[in-house]
Amino acid sequence: MWIKLTGVKAYTANGKTYAYDRLSKQSMREHVAEKDLPVKRNGEWHGNETFVLALAKVRAGQPVEGTVQALITAYKRNEVSVRGRKAFAALAERTREDYEKDLSRLTGAKIDDRMISGEPPESITVDIVRDLRDGWAAKHGATQTTRIMSACSVVWSYGLEYGEVTTNPWKAVKAPARDSRGERANRPWSVSEVLIMIETAPHDGLARAYALALMGIRPEQLPALTLREFRGLLKARKTGREHHIKIPDALRPLFEGIETSIMVTNGPDGLPWTKYAQLRRAFMSHRDRLLKAGDIGPGLTLKGLNHTFGAAMSDEGATEAQMSAGMARSRQTVRKYSDRGDTKRLSGVAFDLLSAWLTQSKNADKLSKGSDTT
């Protein structure tokens, strides 16, 4: 049965049919198979029952049943733990955001010019997963591709539990191998790099950002951090765990004179950064200037300061429980720092790392005065 379509712009190009819903502003190629796209009859476009039903669901904001998009939507709406994994709604806010971004890589991908989001989950075979993996690895890198594949595997595990799929092809394909010859992502900073980056920071707000990242706080949390929040327990946005840390004596001069309700990190004009992108741009500008001068090595990132902190704690003999509390990460996550082969050169980067810089700088006299800023 063919039904005349209204509110749909359809056309053919290069032998393919395209349909665009004017109301929802979505391409229908993402929601139906090629065989169910509209056809032109007597000069007007008509759709079959499958297309019309899919069109109605798209306009109502619902995914078409039996598609990858529908499986993802069902997983997000589920409130019950599946196979030992937390429900999507129970995940930390930052983790949910990461899953949303990673799964959008899948729904935005194509198979033979067809959007994966509109394909049946069972049609995603091991060979297709391999092709997707190789394409993502070339475009986004091995680390991000591994994360995308992990998110997809979680969704398919949900589908297995509720009978939506019969296999999980994502588990059958190995994650892309990282090039061991290349520079490691987010590598730990050396002692000299930490000192020179803080000492040459163009303003105190950026220096404080370096110091806090060195103390294990995630870089993306820094722009919204106030001193009042930092006094006690700071909940990590990604894991939901709490940081059990306070400002050490060697770092107090960097935080003197700050009102407790004021953002700890800020730009050169004294106004607080409201977005992580602002802090990241300031860091990259500072880092690139020193890299060009040959004062630091390549590969420095703010995230690398977190790894520097973890490696230093491991060097100082901290237990997994202490590292987990200090970094607001799980014990499984912090365990990797004790396995690093190059952490011994970082010995001394812990809380008193900056004492050498402070004692030989203009801030040295502040140390002798002491401070109640904790």
Image (cartoon, rainbow, N blue to C red):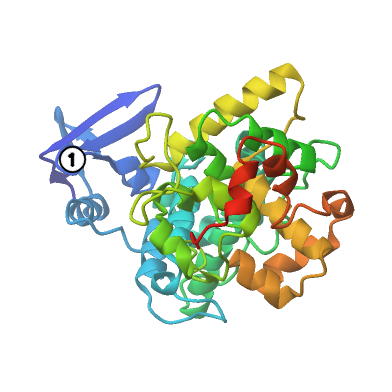
Residue 40 in picture, x, y percent from top left: 21, 32
Given residues 295 and 180, the one toward you in this image is: 295
**Up-down relation of residue 245 to residue 269 (above or below):** below
Given residues 356 and 293, the one toward you in this image is: 356
Q: Residue at x 45, y 59 (%)?
A: 94
Kind of element beneath mark 1: strand
Q: Residue at x 48, y 39 (%)?
A: 205
**Type of the residue with mark 1:** His
Could you classify mark 1 by the number of other residues whose Cα lies within 10 Å: few (under 14), some (14-19), or many (20 or more)?
A: many
Residue 242 visible in the picture? yes
> Where, by quadrant of the figure, is residue 115 drawn?
top left
Q: Residue at x 77, y 71 (%)?
A: 318
The answer to whether 144 appears left or right of 106 in the picture is right
Q: Residue furthest top?
A: 293
> Where, by quadrant of the figure, is residue 76 drawn?
bottom left
Residue 130 visible in the picture? no
The answer to whether 200 appears left or right of 5 in the picture is right
Residue 346 in picture, x, y percent from top left: 82, 50
Which residue is the site of mark 1? 46
Residue 331 in picture, x, y percent from top left: 68, 73
Residue 348 in picture, x, y percent from top left: 80, 54
Given residues 103 and 328, the one toward you in this image is: 328
